Image (tube, rainbow, N blue to C red):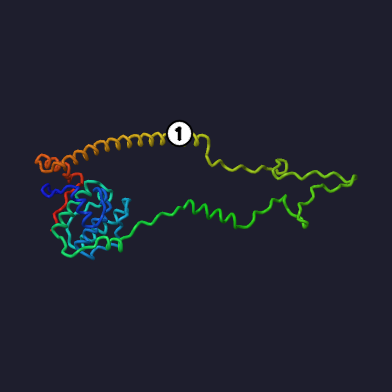
Amino acid sequence: MHNDNYVGKTQLIEWMNKTLDLEYTKVEDCANGAAFCQIIDAIYPGTVPMGRVNFNAQLQHENFENYKVLQEVFSKNGIKQFIDVENLSAGKYMAVLEMLQWLYGFYEANKPDQEYNAKSRRHSKTRSIPKPLHRTGQYQRSTESTTRSGAPLPLKPTESITRSGYPPSQKKPRTPANAPKQEPPKSATDPASSPTQAQAPADPAGTPIQEAHWKARIKELKTELKGAKEDLEGMTEERDFYYDKLRRVEDFCQQHEDVDLIQTILGILYETDEAQGFLPPQDAE
């Protein structure tokens, strides 16, 4: 991005809101790419498939779909401008700001003559995200209704019903005094009833040695995971600390943009690094 074409973010947001009848308050609101698509639709009416543009996109893969539309529209209208889809879809602040500044300049150079009804075009064509179903509650309701309306539970073997509707008598039948005594049948589980005892199934957990090995491995992995989480938290705090400082410096510089030294500082803040893959935007032909 060239320093002489620099436009403050406040002016950019005001321009975006006025052009598309939006209520954005910060650069990050443009991160999903939907407004970028509609700016091109305002310049080249009817060339953007607004039915595929998702203004409610929040997740990275949803943003990615909007930027795919933007790439297709650029190609259709012969716009030769690099789109950093990866960083834009991820909502990287600098990538979004650079794209917003480039679009501002492109719009000013190709401003359409006819009036553009952004709200009507947006509401009649764009789509929104459907609300997710509460699968857990739905499953519970289904299970409960099946239990209520299903067949009655079978009776236990000891709960058979007689014709009179009452359980059978629990009295034992009388046995003649001279009848020989009968021994109760031996249970199938009695060791004496079968020559060989059934072999017990193998322990699914394995031998004690294997169990001890896996317990030690799980403990080791938990320790590694805890250390990785602590490192991530530390790096996140450090990143946020320096990012906040840079934002404060940026806000101060934008309040004093007419000073030459401030322009130099802004140039450093917004410079790109080709070695790291942060390529500067190409000038549109």
Residue 272 locus on image (x, y percent): 17, 45
Q: Residue furthest left?
A: 260
Q: How many marks?
A: 1
- Image quarter hosting the C terminus: bottom left
Q: Residue at x 63, y 57 (%)?
A: 151
In the structure shown, which secondary structural element does the residue marked by tag 1 occupy?
A: helix
The residue at the point 27 percent across, 38 percent down is 240
Residue 181, how many percent across, how many down? 85, 44
Residue at 21 percent of width and 54 percent of height:
16
Question: Is residue 26 placed above or below 231 in the rendered structure?
Answer: below
Residue at image position (71%, 51%) is: 157
Question: Which corner quadrant of the image does residue 143 belong to?
Answer: bottom right
Q: Is residue 198 left or right of residue 227?
A: right
Task: Return the residue nearer the eye: 95 or 42.
Answer: 42
> Of residues 193 and 119, which is closer to you in this image?
119
Q: Which residue is mark 1?
A: 216
Local crowd size for mark 1, using a 10 Å CA cut-off: few (<14), some (14–19), many (≥20): few
Please state the horizontal and vertical placement of residue 179, each as a whole percent of the image. Answer: 88, 46
User: Label 1 is placed on what type of residue?
Assistant: Ala
| Residue 239 position within the rendered picture, expressed as x and y whole percent measured from the top left | 27, 37
